[in-house]
């Protein structure tokens, strides 16, 4: 694992101690949005696979622990404010979404390609 310019201690978590994490695949397709805190990020850095914090269950979860659809972390970037992560992964198994879809982003609200 290569170390970047931003130190983990410089990351800015929200008032509940959480930070949004956008997960993309190797081709840049958006797979999911989840939340991390310092412990989830530490587990991710240690294991090389994605770990998140479930706001509804209030517990840590290792992506794919029950489904087998794990995510190998390829890189972790932060935005310009250091308050959002962009995690590039190699998606293993059927996909990232608990519904069985490859991506959690499958429902269109609007499309403006023809304008």
Image (tube, rainbow, N blue to C red):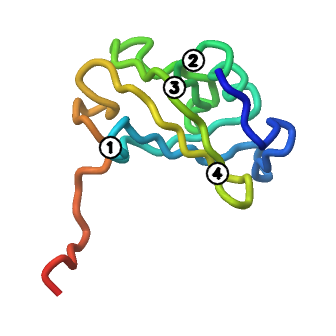
Q: Is residue 80 above or below residue 112?
A: above
Q: Label 4 crowding class (10 Å Cα cut-off): few <14, some 14-19, many 20+?
A: many
Q: Which residue is mark 4?
A: 84
Name the secondary structure under disc 2.
loop
Image-based side of 8 in relation to 29, left or right: right
Image-based side of 96 in relation to 63, left or right: left
Residue drawn at x 53%, y 38% as measured from the top left: 87
- Numbered disc in front, either 4 or 3: 3
Depth check: give the residue in front, 57 or 42. Answer: 42
Q: Quadrant of the N terminus?
A: top right
- The residue lying furthest to the left in this view is 114
* Chain-order first, disc 1 or disc 2: 2
Q: Label 3 crowding class (10 Å Cα cut-off): few <14, some 14-19, many 20+?
A: many
Image-based side of 67 in relation to 5, left or right: left
Depth check: give the residue in front, 104 or 88. Answer: 88
Q: Position of residue 51 (x, y in %)?
A: 57, 24
Q: Which residue is mark 1?
A: 104
Residue drawn at x 59%, y 40% as measured from the top left: 35
- Numbered disc in front, either 1 or 4: 4
* Chain-order first, disc 3 or disc 2: 2
Q: Which residue is mark 2?
A: 48
Q: Label 1 crowding class (10 Å Cα cut-off): few <14, some 14-19, many 20+?
A: some
Marks 1 and 3, Cα distance to the nearest angstrom? 18 Å
Q: Which mark is residue 73?
A: 3
Q: Label 2 crowding class (10 Å Cα cut-off): few <14, some 14-19, many 20+?
A: some
* Chain-order first, disc 1 or disc 4: 4
Q: Is residue 110 above or below residue 5?
A: below
Name the secondary structure under disc 3.
strand
- The answer to whether the residues at label 3 and label 2 have Cβ atoms under 8 Å apart is yes
- The answer to whether the residues at label 1 and label 2 have Cβ atoms under 8 Å apart is no
């Amino acid at each position: 694992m290569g170390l970047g310019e931003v130190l983990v201690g410089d990351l800015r978590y929200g008032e509940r101690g959480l930070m949004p994490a956008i997960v993309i695949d190797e081709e840049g397709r958006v797979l999911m949005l989840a939340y991390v805190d310092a412990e989830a990020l530490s587990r991710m850095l240690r294991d090389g696979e994605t770990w998140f914090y479930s706001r509804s269950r209030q517990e840590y979860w290792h992506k794919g622990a029950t489904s087998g659809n794990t995510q190998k972390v390829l890189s972790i970037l932060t935005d310009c404010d250091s308050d959002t992560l962009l995690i590039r992964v190699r998606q293993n198994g059927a996909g990232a979404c608990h519904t069985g879809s490859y991506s959690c982003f499958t429902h269109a609200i609007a499309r403006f390609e023809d304008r």
